[in-house]
Every structure is written in C-alpha cells, then in structure tokens.
Image: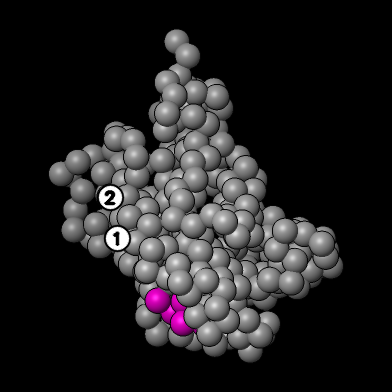
Amino acid sequence: MNPAGRVAGKVALITGAARGMGAAHARAMAREGATVAIADIAPEAGERLAAELRGAGGQASYHDHDVTDPAAWHDVVDAVHQAHGAIDVLVNNAGVQMRSFGIEADDDEWAKVTAVNQYGVFLGMRAVIPVMQKAKSGSIVNTSSIAAWAGLPDRALYSASKGAVQALTLAMAADHLQDGIRVNCVNPGTADTPWVQRLLAASDDPVAERVALEARQPIGRLVSAEEVAAAICYLAESTATTGTALAVDGGMQGLRPRR
C-alpha cells in the first residue's frame, strides 16, 4: 500500500466491490493509499477481499449492503463513519446486466436493471452527499458504460439505465459544484469480467463470441478491469475534473474497428 498514493488518507466507499470489476477498484484504491469500505451482497467474498487488503498493509472493511434499499444506504453510511470516520470518495459501481432484445424485455427485467443500475446510484449520492457537504469536499465516481453512447444490440434495458447514470452524473455535478463535490462517471467498453466469462460459457460458440466482442473494440481486445480501476482512481483524486464521462472503451466511442 502506498502512503503517498493519489488517494492517500481518503476513505472510499465502493459498491459491488466484493468481486469482478468492483474488486479491481478496491485493490487499486487500496494500492493508492485509500481506506476501502467494500459494500456488496456477497459477504464471503467481501470479507475475504477486506482481509486480503488488510494483509497487504491497507485498511479495509466489508459491509453487507443492498443498493436498492434507501434505509440500507443510511445504515452503510453510519457503519462506514463508525469504522473509518469519514467518506471522502463514493464509487457507485454495483450493477446488473441482462441481454434484452428491444420490446421482448419484460417488466421484471426492467424493474431489476433500473433499480440497481439507476435508482441505486441516485440513492448512493443522496445518502453520501450530505456527509460531503459538511466536509465541503468529496468525489463521486459513477459507473456508466459505452452503452450510454452506442446502440448495442440486445442491451436495451442496460443501455437505458447507463444513459440515465451519465445524465444524472452531469446534473449532480452541476448541482453540487459549489459544495466542493466533484461528480464524474466512467464509461467502460466491454471488459474482461466474470460477467463476460459467464456470457461466453453460455454461448454455443464461445470462441467466435469472444472474437466478435474483441473485434467491435478498435484496439482489438477487451478492456481489463484494472484499466477501468485506473480511471476510477484518477477521477477520485483529480481536483479539476467534474461533470465528465470518461471513456475506457478501447476506442468504441469515437473510432471504428480496422477492417
């Protein structure tokens, strides 16, 4: 752990941080000197990660937390305060992804994706911003997606939720600029995460599907969780960056794959 790192001395609350991309964010934040509060609904994995970070010389805690429950947000903010004394950084990382072809998506799928990806992000900001207002400083990083910009097939509900996250990020950045609170989002492309691994495992032709996923990113490969985590750390510490949607997408936003 780096006592002189980019977020040294800061307390970072990260949702969905027990596994996958969220765990990469937690490790990166800890390496950069932050105390990490891991919030998730996976206690075994979360406690294991917290122990790993503590074993490497960092400070970390696990908190069982449902991002869709307003009362749970008050509880986790109180718990993090009791454990670490502050919340300087909020990373709204928790999310779900479903393949949904246009109008074939059903009401339950819409409700679940919207509750976690969109409503959960709002609840997190609503719970943490008053704490940051008292401190007159803070950094919030929301996880949007390239799906907020690009019309990806079979991603209608997911795209809608991530577009809402990006819009909400910009609006909250404007609303809380005078509070000393910066609000940004990161927009990953297709990342090599456990979700993608499950997607490939369920495919009739995993090799062809992976090739297709890699080919749609101009750099010709999937984005790594560590690359997204590096962007999260940058947005967490950059004092001059707010109201920004930072693409970590292998060029998907502005480039076209080489033919």
Determine which residue is flagged by label 2.
160
**Mark 2 secondary-structure assignment:** helix
**Magenta-drawn stretch contains 98:** no
Most foreground residue, 143 or 40: 143
The residue located at (64%, 59%) in the rendering is 237
- Neighbor class of circle 2 (other Cα within 10 Å; few <14, some 14-19, many 20+) is some
Left-right relation of 228 to 98: right
Q: Quadrant of the N terminus?
A: bottom right
Labels 1, 2: front one: 2
Tell me where residue 129 appears, x and y as whole percent: 46, 76
Q: Quadrant of the C terminus?
A: top left
Quadrant of the image occupied by residue 37: bottom right
Most foreground residue, 189 or 125: 125
Left-right relation of 18 to 187: right
Determine which residue is flagged by label 1.
114
Quadrant of the image occupied by residue 43: bottom right
**Mark 1 secondary-structure assignment:** helix
- Neighbor class of circle 1 (other Cα within 10 Å; few <14, some 14-19, many 20+) is many
Q: Which secondary structure class fits the magenta region best?
A: helix
Q: Give the residue type at disc 1.
A: Thr
The residue located at (42%, 63%) in the rendering is 173
Q: Are marks 1 and 2 in contact (CB under 8 Å)?
A: yes
Please indicate, yes or no, whether residue 50 appears anywhere in the rendered image. no
Tell me where residue 222 appears, x and y as whole percent: 55, 32
In the rendered structure, which segment of residues is drawn in magenta? 126-131
In the image as oriented, which residue stretches furthest toward the top?
A: 259
Q: Earlier in the sequence, mark 1 or mark 2?
A: 1
